[in-house]
Structures are given as C-alpha cells and as structure tokens.
C-alpha cells in the first residue's frame, strides 16, 4: 500500500455522468500508479490592468499616448468645473520613463472647486469598508505664492462626495513633488459610475497652472477570490501578452522599480499596460500564495507577424537570460539578480519552469531556430530549470527535443467531455505537458479585466456565462488530466477573469467553472489510485463525479482498504443551463454534507453535478 493510505490520509473521489440510469461498479486499485504533481492545478491570465492589479485609475500616467490627439491622450480624464486639461510632453518630465504630464489651467475668474476627474476602468467601485490609497506628483511650471490645499476625493457622477481628504500644495514647488493620502469613504453607492477627483479652490488659483503626473489610486479585492482557488502555480507575465511588435514586447526590465520608472507598453489586446504589476510583483504574488511561477520569456516572435532573424537573436536571448536571473539568479554573479536583492529579495523566487514564447504555432517555421537557440542557451545557463515549448506538440520537430510542452485548447463543452481520454493515448517517453484552456464557449470568473472583455461576447458563439453543462464538461476533462498527471504536470483555466459590462455591480462573481476549478484544487491527492476505467465514449467519469445530463447515476465503489463510516461530500449541482450572473450570482455554489460509507458503498451522483467525496482510511 502506498503512502496515501496511511490512517490520517484523506482521499478524494470524483465522478462525471453524461446520461443513463446506470449502475456502475468501480473497483479501486490498491496500488498507487503514480504521484500527482503538486503543481497540477493553477492559474494563468493575460493582463492585470483593470483586474488583478489594484490600480483604479485608467491612463494614470499618460503612458504611450500621442499628445497630438488630446481626445485619446486624455482618455478617462475629465475636467471638473471648467479647469482646462492638456496632456503635454513635459519639458521637465517626472522621469525618463514617463515623458508626459497633465497640465491643469485654472481660468481667471474661476470660483468653486476646479480640477480633474478620472472615471476608472469600468467605473470605480467605492465601498466604505475599504481604505483607498491615493498619490500624485505635482509641480507649478510657474512659481506662485500659493500655499493651500487640494482635495483628493471619490465622488459620484453627479458630484456627491463619497469620501475625501486634503493635501497641501506649495506654489513655489517648481520641481516634482509626490504627495500621498488615504481616502476613507463614508458611503458605498450601488452604482459604479464614480470618479476619482483632485480639485483646488478656483478663486485662489485663478490664472495659474499645475502639472500632474502619475496620479494613483489603489484598491484591494480580487486577489482574495483568486487566492481562494488555492492555485499551485501562476503563469506569468500572462499568456497572450508578450508583444504584438518587437518594440512593444514585454521586457522584464521595463516593469521593475518605482512606478515612475516604468514606461508601460501597448499590450497585445490593444490598450496600454501600466506595468504597475511588474515582474517583481508577479513573483511576490506567487510566493505569497505559495505558488510556483511558470514564467515565459519573449522568444523572438511578435504576434503581429515579425520573427527576429536567426543571426540576430543574441540580444533577445541575453534579455531572457537576464530575466531568468532576475527571478532565480545568484546576486553575486548577475546584475539582474543583484537588482532583485536590492529590492529586498536576495533569495530566488519559486520558478522551476520557463516557457519559451507563447503559442508559437503562430510562427512554427521560425520556432525551429528560435527554440533551438533560446532553449540551448537558457538550458546551459540554468541547468536546473525545465523549458517549455509552445508550438503544436511534435509539429514541427524541435531540436533539442523539448521535455515539456504548453498546450492550449479552447473548445466546446462536449469536446472536453469526449476528449477526457486524450492523454491516455500519449506515449510515456519523458515528455510532460502543461494544459491551458478549457471551454472556449465560456468565460471565467466574472470581474473586471480589459483583456478578457473580448471573451464572453455572445456574438462569436461563446457563452456569456459558464453553465453547469459547460462546467461539468470541463470537469470530465480534468478527470482525464488527473488520471494522466504522470505526464500532465500543470493545467489552468482560461480566461480566468471576465469583465461583466454592468455598471450596477463591481463585485466578483465566482462562476460555475470557478467552483469546478476550486473543487479540484481543494481536493488534491498526492497519488493517483487506478480504478475500473470509465468508458471513454461513455457518460460517467470518476475520480471526482461530474454529471452532465439531468439524470442521476448510481456508482458503487469497492475500496481495497477499510474507511471511517463518515465521509464528506462537496457537491456542485444545478440545472443544465444554470449560470452565476450579476443578477443571480449565487445560483450554483458548492454545498458540503456528510454521508455514511463503508469499504463498499454506493453514491448517487445527481444530474449536472460535480462531487468531491473525502473519505478517511480507518
Ligand atoms: C440509485 O440509488 C437510489 C438510492 O440508493 C435508489 O433509490 C435509486 O433507485 C437508484 N437509481 C438507479 C438508477 O439505480
Ligand atoms: C483622435 O483619436 C480619436 C480616437 O481614436 C479619433 O476618433 C480622432 O479622429 C482623432 N483626432 C485626430 C485629430 O486625429
Ligand atoms: C463592501 O465590502 C464589504 C467587505 O468586503 C462587503 O461585505 C460588502 O458587501 C461590500 N459592499 C458593497 C456595497 O459591495
Ligand atoms: C478640506 O479643506 C476644506 C477647506 O479648508 C474644508 O472645508 C474641508 O472640510 C476639508 N476636507 C477634509 C476631508 O478635511
Ligand atoms: C515650498 O517649497 C519651497 C521650494 O521647494 C520650499 O523652499 C518651501 O519651504 C516650501 N514651503 C512650505 C510651506 O513647505
Ligand atoms: C496603501 O498604503 C499602505 C501604506 O503605505 C500600504 O501598506 C498598503 O499596502 C497600500 N495599499 C495598496 C492597495 O496599495
Ligand atoms: C531593458 O533592457 C533592454 C535591453 O535588454 C534595453 O534596450 C532597455 O533600454 C532596458 N530598459 C530600461 C528601462 O532600462
Ligand atoms: C541544482 O540542483 C542541484 C541538485 O539538486 C543542487 O545541488 C544545486 O544547488 C542546484 N543549483 C542551483 C543553482 O540551484
Ligand atoms: C513522445 O510521445 C509523443 C506522444 O505520443 C510522440 O508524438 C513523440 O514523438 C514522442 N517523442 C519521442 C522523442 O519519442
Ligand atoms: C492495479 O494496478 C496494477 C499494477 O499497476 C495493474 O496491473 C492492474 O491492472 C490494476 N488494476 C486496476 C483495476 O486498474
Ligand atoms: C468629474 C468627472 O470625472 N466626471 C466623469 C465621471 O465619470 C463619468 C463616466 O463614468 C464621466 O462621464 C464624467 O465626466
């Protein structure tokens, strides 16, 4: 008997049923066939801005904007009470990374409070149980005798103050000065159409101009929902966000250090990434949540179609080596690692796997030499790390032979259920797989991100919200991944976050698919126990039970060891088309109960359900 069967060990059993009123007997094997990798269930996403990253303000630093078009340069910013706003190329920039600033002219004859407002990413959720940090840089381009206050606040679109605090501005300050404050709202409006504002008294400042740079407002929330999934790895810096062009590729060294030193970039989904969530924040996030980082390096291909020529890859490979050194290198041997140490983290971060590119099947012809050069150089520099190829598996044939592959699948719910056995047919020849994807026809956790806004639009046939039918299909596939976890070492759902265009919410809604991921993640085994195999073309799958039609199925388990007679059931159950939506966020959520079991016991898996049974060996 293997280690998992010691008396204190919990075991989880999972099932999926498709149709039939079947009576199924599952004989569980006594001998574990393989260990389950601790990395198996984790997370990936495409970009943090407007989502995981706690920044509330959109276009906070006028990064990458073209000042010749003020409409776009001022995106998300609004004048309060007649202040004249212009995004300028500063003659004295706040930093070389941030050349632009917001010039705010108070017209002569002004009165009352004038200034600037920012509408946030999808509005701004204001909740009196949160404290909001705010900061900005300012300078007076022309010195004045002014010495007074600016009010930093959160207000509704009609100007009702939800919370505010005062900071002092000094008119003789002609160089940049940063001010910090916190806002404690007293009201939690239901609506999200609120603004962040900075205003000054129009009468005292009439005729004067103040320049602002990198206003900043932060919140805390989404992180807690992601953390509750208990992920064991995190793919960074996001999936499809390595760069549409060579110039706008993700460069680790542009995302480190003070925010004011980060230029930002046009991300792959067409909007500006602040890079406020940079490599150090990502790696710290991994460490805080006890996750391993699966970190990607840019591999010489820009998604817009440009591949770097074979002879010109050198500097890009060096930048990738520097990036990995920043994450895990020895500070006495590498400047990049020394930079990490200077930020307070001399120890290496938990990175064991590095991906060379992302979805390089888009440039399979050049990936042959790019993979060859990047993987050879990186493997030589980091013998202890594993490198993942990202083209189609074994197509083209790559040299050196990749030990690991990242496979992306976006498919329909029925495809996932029907392909639960796909990895059973793979040879055991030393190649390991990271599976990303899951139902294309659905979205993940329904909250704000810009990128994943693209998903969840019914126009392209995708579901607006995951349903029990789609989520149980994914669960069937995950059972196959768990069974094949001798060669599948990691899997994640995508898209992880989805913004619901709904100005009346601003909350985080775990979807039915979120709960499936969470059930698997919270009910991990250390080892996989073989049992009577499900029918590959059949309808009931186990390890955890999932039911994809509205008909119950009885499953009898015959265990090879005695168990305590009380077992816990975590049951996710709903009707085929049930979804968690902003109007009905709690339609489906897991319920916990206790059942009586024996060494042989029957479990009635209800229709459209995922059950995790936890038994204790006697
Ligand atoms: C499943 O088990 C329940 C309770 O043991 C029983 O009432 C029901 O008839 C069984 N269903 C089938 C399809 O065997
Ligand atoms: C500025 O950009 C907006 C939005 O992209 C566009 O509609 C407008 O035509 C541009 N204006 C000028 C003067 O180019
Ligand atoms: C405000 O936050 C608290 C604590 O997180 C939460 O319980 C409450 O539901 C939130 N209120 C609104 C209106 O979202
Ligand atoms: C800010 O200062 C103004 C003018 O002195 C005062 O009326 C207001 O109450 C102050 N607001 C806060 C939040 O302290
Ligand atoms: C205002 O700024 C000037 C220039 O930085 C400084 O000399 C002066 O002490 C400041 N005044 C106050 C009241 O902080
Ligand atoms: C707000 O500021 C405090 C103090 O500087 C800091 O500890 C906290 O992490 C900040 N919160 C956010 C969300 O940035
Ligand atoms: C980051 O490194 C690249 C070369 O690897 C360099 O071209 C770029 O200027 C660096 N960026 C910053 C902000 O130093
Ligand atoms: C690489 O792994 C070996 C064997 O586990 C270990 O002794 C060595 O310290 C590791 N080297 C680094 C740089 O982590
Ligand atoms: C390993 O197995 C895969 C999947 O069955 C196969 O396509 C590939 O050619 C094998 N690779 C080697 C090096 O044998
Ligand atoms: C149990 O495991 C042994 C050894 O791996 C294997 O030979 C046997 O077929 C397995 N039985 C079942 C029911 O999977
Ligand atoms: C003062 C201010 O910024 N007002 C803006 C608040 O946000 C809405 C959009 O949500 C804008 O329309 C207002 O102009």
Image (cartoon, rainbow, N blue to C red):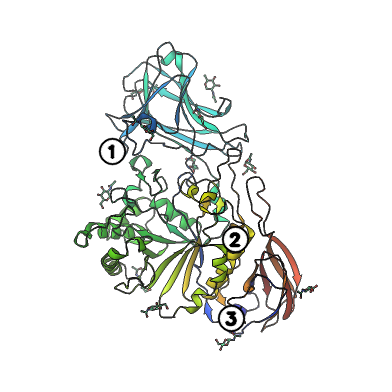
Q: Nearer the viewer, mark 2 or mark 1?
A: 2
Residue at the spot x=45%, y=19% of the render? 82
Q: Which residue is mark 3?
A: 530
As drawn, 602 above or below 377: below
Label 3 CB less than 8 angstroms from ligand 10: yes
**Left or right: residue 273 compared with residue 527:** left
As drawn, 587 above or below 600: above
The residue closer to the viewer here, 232 or 303, is: 303
Q: Do tag 3 and tag 2 residues touch (Cβ < 8 Å)?
A: no
Q: Which mark is residue 470?
A: 2
The residue closer to the viewer here, 573 or 213, is: 573
Q: CA distance from mark 3 to mark 2?
A: 26 Å
Of mark 2 and mark 1, the one earlier in the sequence is 1
* x and y percentages locating residue 525 in the rendered image: 58, 72
**Left or right: residue 535 compared with residue 121:** right
* x and y percentages locating residue 301 in the rendered image: 30, 57
Q: CA distance from mark 2 to mark 1?
A: 49 Å
Q: Quadrant of the C terminus?
A: bottom right
* x and y percentages locating residue 45 in the rendered image: 46, 55
As drawn, 204 above or below 7: above
Q: Secondary structure at mark 1?
A: loop
């Amino acid at each position: 008997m293997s280690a998992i069967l010691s008396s204190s060990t919990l075991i989880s059993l999972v099932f999926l049923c498709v149709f039939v009123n079947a009576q199924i007997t599952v004989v569980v094997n006594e001998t574990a066939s393989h260990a389950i990798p601790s990395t198996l269930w984790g997370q990936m996403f495409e970009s943090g801005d407007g989502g995981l990253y706690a920044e509330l303000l959109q276009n906070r630093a006028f990064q990458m904007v073209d000042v010749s078009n003020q409409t776009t340069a001022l995106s998300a910013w609004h004048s309060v009470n007649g202040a004249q706003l212009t995004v300028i190329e500063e003659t004295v920039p706040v930093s070389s990374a941030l050349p632009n600033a917001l010039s705010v002219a108070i017209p002569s004859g002004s009165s009352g409070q004038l200034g600037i407002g920012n509408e946030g990413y999808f509005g701004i959720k204001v909740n009196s149980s949160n404290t909001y940090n705010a900061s900005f840089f300012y300078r007076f381009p022309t010195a004045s005798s002014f010495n007074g206050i600016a009010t930093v606040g959160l207000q509704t679109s009609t100007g009702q103050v939800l919370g505010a605090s005062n900071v002092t501005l000094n008119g003789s300050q002609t160089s940049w000065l940063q001010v910090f404050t916190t806002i404690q709202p007293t009201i939690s409006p239901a609506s999200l159409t609120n603004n962040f504002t900075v205003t000054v008294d129009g009468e005292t400042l009439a005729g004067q101009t103040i320049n602002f740079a990198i206003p900043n407002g932060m919140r805390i929330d989404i992180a807690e929902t992601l953390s509750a999934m208990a992920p064991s790895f995190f793919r960074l810096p996001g999936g499809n966000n390595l760069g549409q062009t060579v110039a706008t590729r993700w460069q680790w060294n542009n995302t480190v250090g003070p925010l004011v030193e980060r230029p930002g970039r046009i991300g792959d989904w067409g909007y500006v990434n602040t890079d406020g969530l940079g490599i150090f924040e990502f790696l710290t996030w991994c460490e805080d949540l006890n996750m391993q980082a699966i970190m990607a390096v840019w591999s010489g291909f820009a998604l817009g179609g440009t591949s770097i020529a074979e002879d010109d890859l050198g500097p890009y490979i060096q930048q990738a080596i520097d990036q990995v050194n920043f994450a895990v290198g020895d500070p006495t041997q590498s400047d990049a690692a020394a930079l990490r140490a200077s930020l307070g983290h001399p120890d290496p971060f938990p990175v064991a796997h590095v991906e060379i590119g992302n979805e390089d099947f888009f440039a399979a012809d050049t990936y042959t030499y790019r993979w060859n050069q990047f993987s050879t150089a990186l493997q030589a520099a980091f013998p202890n790390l594993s490198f993942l190829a990202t083209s189609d598996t074994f197509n083209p044939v790559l040299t050196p032979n990749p030990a690991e592959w990242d496979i992306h699948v976006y498919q329909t719910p029925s495809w996932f259920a029907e392909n639960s056995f796909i990895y059973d047919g793979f040879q055991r020849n030393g190649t390991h797989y990271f599976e990303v994807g899951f139902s294309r026809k659905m979205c993940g956790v329904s909250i704000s991100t810009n990128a994943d806004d693209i998903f969840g639009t019914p126009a392209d046939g995708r579901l607006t919200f995951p349903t029990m039918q789609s989520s149980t299909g994914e669960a069937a596939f995950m059972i196959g991944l768990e069974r094949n976890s001798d060669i599948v070492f990691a899997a994640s759902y995508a898209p992880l976050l989805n913004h619901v265009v709904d100005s009346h919410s601003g909350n985080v809604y775990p979807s039915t698919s979120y709960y499936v991921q969470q059930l698997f993640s919270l009910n991990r085994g250390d080892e996989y126990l073989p049992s009577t195999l499900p029918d590959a073309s059949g309808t009931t799958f186990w390890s955890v039970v999932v039911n994809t039609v509205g008909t119950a199925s009885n499953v009898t388990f015959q265990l090879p060891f005695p168990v305590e007679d009380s077992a816990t059931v975590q049951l996710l159950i709903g009707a085929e088309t049930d979804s968690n939506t902003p109007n009905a966020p709690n339609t489906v959520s897991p319920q916990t109960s206790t059942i009586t079991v024996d060494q042989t016991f029957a479990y009635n898996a209800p229709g459209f359900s995922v059950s995790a049974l936890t038994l204790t060996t006697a």
